[in-house]
Image (spheres, rainbow, N blue to C red):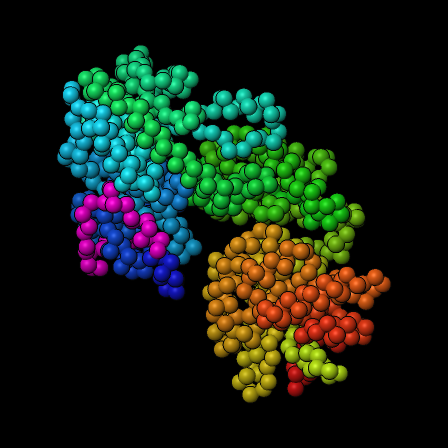
Amino acid sequence: MNKNIDDSTTADVLQDAFIDENIQSSMNFDGLDDVVYNSSSSFDISEVADILLDNIDEYVFITDSVSKNIVYINKPLSDALGLKGGFVGTCHELLRGCDKPCEGCNANHSLDGKFYVTSLVSSKLKDNYVIKSKNIELYSRTYTINVAVSRNQDVNNEFLTLKEGLSVNDIVGPFTIIYTKNLKNPDVQLYRFLECLGIETNSQYAALYELKKSTENDLHLSAKENEQRSKDEDVTRTHLWISQSNHVDNYKVQVPDEIVKKARFEQDVALYDSPLDQAKYFAIPLEVEDEYLGTIFLKDPKQESLNVLIPALKTIASLVSSALSHRIMHSEISMISNRDTLTELKNRNALLSDMNTLGVTDNIGVIYLNVNGLKQINSKLGMKTGDTILIRTASLLRQLLHESDYIYRVGGDEFVGLYPNITSHDFIMVSDMLKAFMTSDKGFSVSVGTAWASNGAFIQSALNQAETDMLAEKKKYYHEHSTEADFVRYRSQNDNVLNIIEPDKIKGFIDRGCFKVMYQPKFKIQGDVAEIAGAEALVRLVINDAVIPPDDFIPALESAHFTHLIDYYVLETIAKRMHERIDNSEKVLPVSCNFSRHTIVRPDFKERLKAIMDKYGIAYNLIPLEVSEHTNTEHHKELVAVTEELSKEGFSISIDDFGTAHANIYSLADLAVSEVKFDKKLIDNICKDNNEKITTILSVLITMCKKLGIKTIAEGVEDQEQNEMLKKLGCDEIQGYFYSRPVKDEEYYGKVK
């Protein structure tokens, strides 16, 4: 277990996770020796024990969100369950005594980053209790914190007994208290409202059915069809309170469909008779500014209590509607962070969350798609055309996977579809249909990979297998189209290059020394003297004595997100060589190392980076981290956060290819930048005819960087005229063939001497 986690961050997460004064019962502080562990789990509670012990509710347990294994139970709950010493088991086994997960399992169903609140009746505890669940990320895994608050047997004392003679203010009083005490947690508000209504009216249960409005229009539907779809939107149950006297599992509770639909369209307070179960259902519609939000149903309420309650219902419904509107707003904000703005599909964040939720699902199919040649399309036809193709791909996926709610755009040109509860035979049929359609002539092409797993616990493996399958299809496609102008950069790629986009093969090339690290020196100009100031590390691939430049293999690695394997190899090569020279008391100068943004935003990047530097005892500022980044690219926010942390620890951050897009200017404000490298395209144009604009722009950029204390470097300098112009403009360092081509480490360090 990694002990270097940011304790303050973990503390903040868990502290926030346990704060809710209204359903907290008395704190139980148990010593560290009292905690109980799953003896088969690697989960280390010592990392968070202090935080847990300071914030314990009556019952607390933590589960692995995929396997559902309980990895921690606090002493009050373990005593209630009669557990002694270590244990092995899942939540459904230990708490419910069931062999399988509960039908309609709500585990991992956290809403807008808050707790998901529900009530459970049938358990080994015999009591009804409220359970609050919230997911947290620790050590690159997802765990679910569950706070099970035992129901107060005298809960009726918190409310009034509805009887003749009560004023409206008396009746509304308990609801007003619930509203004001739970302002920060609308889900708890809603549950407590249902509880209050159910207890006051002596109902069997109280259920909230919420209108599930779609947040986007299907791009393949007409405006009229989208309008009709809006009218047909479903009303589904989201919150439930069950009376202790009503011994039924929550997933079996269901208001008859015909009554739900009738209440949806009549939208008025009414009492409905159900021939289906010989019960009566009292409906309370909820709306804000004449917009229908949902309905509360009370099953078999006591008629005398209803008669007393009705005069106050308008005020009570207004309070509940306000809480529901608040919850919807929070959910919509959360949805924005889990939604791709271009295609309106779910994004990578949503995929990770849904993968946890689907961990208990059987029979799941995974589809991985990648648009072929999107970079070439953007370059040749413009990004607008590329965006149109991405939107069309998303629309096709919605049509072809119409029975799935799990479709995602996970990267620039990558899409994922999950298909739960589908047999292997049916999924093969869906996959074959999808592959045939996506490879047909539509003006663009999509490579498709698929995999199927019998158990949701293997969903990550299935995703990896589907991605591998997609990459194989992509290689085949580029082989078949290698002579087309759109794919000219693939002409020089032979089978060896195309085949390296597999981790084992990349590692094999590294082990055999096929990746060669070269050094391109940088020179500081002082008058007429050029003094070596350091270098940039470059990598070349040598296969069968043929040298393959990075432009031919790096894009393939980036598309497969495997550049981290090369990035770490180059870093370790640089650090090891520096270490040898330092041990021999020889001079070393900074050598910058290129990192793909895919590498930098990996969860373990900071730890891997520091581990390599510390292994060889290299000062962090001796190897500047060089990254190409535009503020409109994917993962920009994560990049900003990581580089800021690294800068505070002493690393130098260098922005490569600066000036290739105007958005780069904002990188100076967003990123903790130590130096910028002007792109070769800028340098190529400074000495051409009518170059006044380029020269002026470059002059302004250099002056701006000097004021910000940022070093400027020009790359791709090839002749004396460019060199003189850059000296005149005040550029700090120059790199390019005019001074030196990339050289082997022996020749570079010879120059350093």
- Whether residue 117 is visible: no
From the top left corner, tell me how far across and down residue 673 is, in percent. 57, 66
Q: Is residue 683 above or below residue 292?
A: below
**With 623 as the anchor, is 32 left or right in this view?**
left
**Figure label count:** 0
**With 329 as the anchor, is 394 left or right in this view?**
right
Q: Residue at x 75, y 54 (%)?
A: 489
From the top left corner, tell me how far across and down residue 576 is, in percent. 55, 76
**With 148 as the anchor, is 696 left or right in this view?**
right
Q: Residue at x 70, y 74 (%)?
A: 730
Residue at the farthest right position: 689
Q: Does the magenta stretch include residue 33?
A: yes
Seen from the viewer's position, the closer of residues 428 and 260 is 260
**Region of the chain picked out in magenta, as a range:** 12-39
Q: In this view, does 712 lie above or below 639?
A: below
From the top left corner, tell me how far across and down residue 323 is, in percent. 35, 34
Q: Does the magenta stretch include residue 160?
A: no
From the top left corner, tell me how far across and down residue 609 is, in percent. 51, 67
Q: In this view, does 516 lie above or below 438?
A: below
Seen from the viewer's position, the closer of residues 614 and 70 is 614
